[in-house]
């Protein structure tokens, strides 16, 4: 923050010393906004571009810079909302490069409901860009039927990404998941085995030892003093708690395993989208 402050002051001094009396006119305000943008002071740049826009001239390039500045400042939602308001929520008025940036932001925050709606609007994106975005969205959402149909459209358009789409559709359909029900059942029968099934060996061994040890202590207590054994009841309660936690933990372990699989697959789609759209 301190570095940005001094950069801003330096920028003001530079521009002020050259054009002192005209510092706040349209051209010099635009130059200063561009300086803030190129020096990666995106929040300040967005504010300065807004001021430039307020001065009366409203070219599409200034509107795009406002949205880009917000987006690069990690204010994706604000960038999307501002993009809509800049054109009075009329998507058909979006310039092509503006539409592409708007699409990228929607895809990045995974607002696929709004993205799907936007893609259905007329004259928003070029045909190839629309097919590329739709196919990527289907793959990200693990919609294999939609991805297959959209990939066929990509093939008809002779898109270079067709092979990637086909490969990822097949890879997605072959993802191997762990059954939460099976993991739960295994842990009911033998504590820890549900986590062995999901590849969580360390937690599985830990659960097996804890449940087994406490259950054995409860058994010894009851064997020595019967139902009056305080030791038996205490360790029995502890063992039951560990046993129940082990069952729930195995269910969650399977869920987490499946999520990791999906997240890794989706990351490939997101990276491809960012590099090629």
Image (cartoon, rainbow, N blue to C red):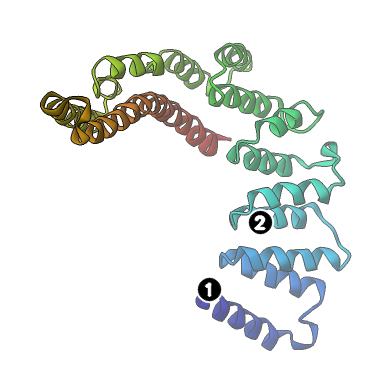
Residue 6 on image: x %, y %: 55, 81
Q: Is residue 49 left or right of residue 131?
A: right
Looking at the rendering, which quadrant does residue 38 occupy? bottom right
The numbered mark, 1 or 2, whose residue comes first in the sequence reads 1
Residue 215 on image: x %, y %: 19, 27
Residue 175 in view of the camera: no
Please count the marks in the image: 2
Q: Which mark is residue 70?
A: 2
Residue 64 in view of the camera: yes
**Badge 1: few (under 14), some or many (20 or more) residues near its Cα, within 10 Å?**
few
Residue that label 1 marks: 1
Q: Is residue 231 left or right of residue 115?
A: left
Residue 10 on image: x %, y %: 58, 82
Q: CA distance from mark 1 to mark 2?
A: 17 Å
Q: Is residue 223 above or below residue 73?
A: above
Picture residue at 32% right of the left edge, 32% below the top: 241
Residue 245 on image: x %, y %: 34, 30
Looking at the rendering, which quadrant does residue 54 occupy? bottom right
Q: Secondary structure at mark 2?
A: helix
Q: Secondary structure at mark 1?
A: loop
Q: Which mark is residue 58?
A: none
Q: Is residue 276 above or below residue 80?
A: above
Picture residue at 70% right of the left edge, 25% below the top: 127
**Badge 2: few (under 14), some or many (20 or more) residues near its Cα, within 10 Å?**
many
Picture residue at 61% right of the left edge, 82% below the top: 9
Quadrant location of the C terminus in the rendered image:
top right
């Amino acid at each position: 923050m301190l570095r940005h402050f001094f950069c801003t002051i330096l920028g003001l001094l530079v521009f002020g010393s050259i054009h002192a009396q005209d510092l706040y006119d349209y051209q010099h305000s635009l130059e200063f906004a561009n300086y803030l943008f190129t020096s990666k002071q995106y929040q300040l740049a967005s504010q300065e571009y807004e001021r430039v826009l307020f001065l009366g001239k409203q070219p599409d390039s200034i509107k795009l810079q406002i949205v880009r500045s917000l987006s690069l400042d990690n204010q994706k939602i604000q960038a999307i909302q501002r993009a809509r308001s800049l054109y009075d929520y009329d998507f058909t008025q979006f310039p092509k490069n503006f539409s592409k940036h708007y699409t990228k932001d929607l895809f990045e925050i995974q607002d696929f409901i709004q993205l799907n709606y936007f893609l259905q609007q007329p004259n928003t994106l070029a045909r190839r860009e629309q097919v590329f975005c739709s196919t990527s969205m289907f793959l990200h959402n693990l919609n294999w039927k939609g991805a297959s149909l959209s990939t066929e459209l990509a093939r008809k358009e002779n898109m270079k990404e067709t092979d990637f789409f086909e490969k990822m559709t097949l890879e997605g359909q072959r993802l191997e998941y762990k059954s939460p029900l099976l993991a739960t059942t295994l842990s009911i029968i033998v504590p820890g085995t549900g986590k062995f099934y999901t590849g969580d060996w360390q937690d599985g061994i830990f659960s097996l030892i804890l449940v087994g040890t406490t259950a054995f202590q409860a058994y010894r207590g009851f064997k020595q003093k019967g139902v009056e054994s305080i030791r038996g009841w205490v360790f029995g309660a502890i063992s039951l708690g560990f046993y129940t936690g082990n069952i729930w933990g195995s269910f969650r372990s399977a869920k987490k395993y499946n999520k990791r699989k999906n997240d890794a697959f989706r990351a490939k789609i997101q990276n491809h989208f960012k590099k090629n759209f």
